[in-house]
Amino acid sequence: MTQNAPFADPEQLSLELEARFRLIGETRMRDLPIYRPDLAVETIGFRAHGPWWAGVLITPWFMNLLLFPRLPEAPALPPEGGDLQLELAGRSERFLSSRDEVLGAYLALSLASPMSGFPDQESARASARTAVTALLEPRAEAPGQAAEPRDPRPATDRRGFLRKLFGG
């Protein structure tokens, strides 16, 4: 699969993501039972993360951590529907490769779907911020303090990981 022409900056990507997924919500998702009309499409925390633009996308039907190629040295994306193992926050995570006719190719890690566990937009936003901090921000270490050992197990228990992540 060919790589995307990179987005200029995370603000441009955020605006395009929000516009695209609002349209998808209005045209394809609104009548599905998993659609929450009280929730809005919103991007949280998009930034440069290694060779990626990375951040969380909240929609009325899912919340995903998304990675878009930012630099030519980003790993080649597998065909749509394939997966790619990447390490985030010391854990190996399996991202699903997706492609959109407007946005191009990207990787997605599901954080929540459906969105029934969130009473309102603010709680979804707070969980998205927690995910950005836990998955994309380096852990601060006090001087002289050893880093926490990484969990050597693969991320096979996503529910457990996300429960820890979101404090559930």
Image (cartoon, helix red, strand yellow):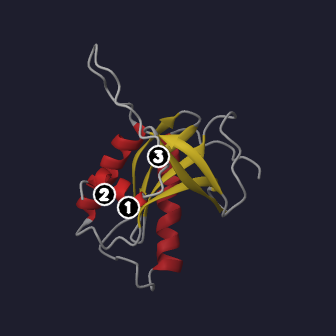
Q: Position of residue 162 (x, y in %)?
A: 35, 56
Q: Is residue 147 left or right of residue 123?
A: right
> SS for tag 3?
loop
Question: Mark 2 and mark 1: span between their CA atoms?
Answer: 6 Å
Labels 3, 1: front one: 3
Dot label at residue 159: 1
Circle 3 Cα neighbour tier, 10 Å, few/some/many (<14 / 14–19 / ≥20): few
Judge by depth and name the residue closer to the eye, 63 or 59. Answer: 63
Dot label at residue 153: 3
**Mark 2: amino acid:** Arg
Check the image and report above or below for 148 versus 5: above
**Dot placed on the residue nearer the N-terminal end, 3 or 1:** 3
The residue depicted at 64 percent of the width and 34 percent of the height is: 71
Check the image and report above or below for 71 versus 158: above
Judge by depth and name the residue closer to the eye, 116 or 160. Answer: 160
**Mark 3: amino acid:** Arg
Labels 3, 2: front one: 3
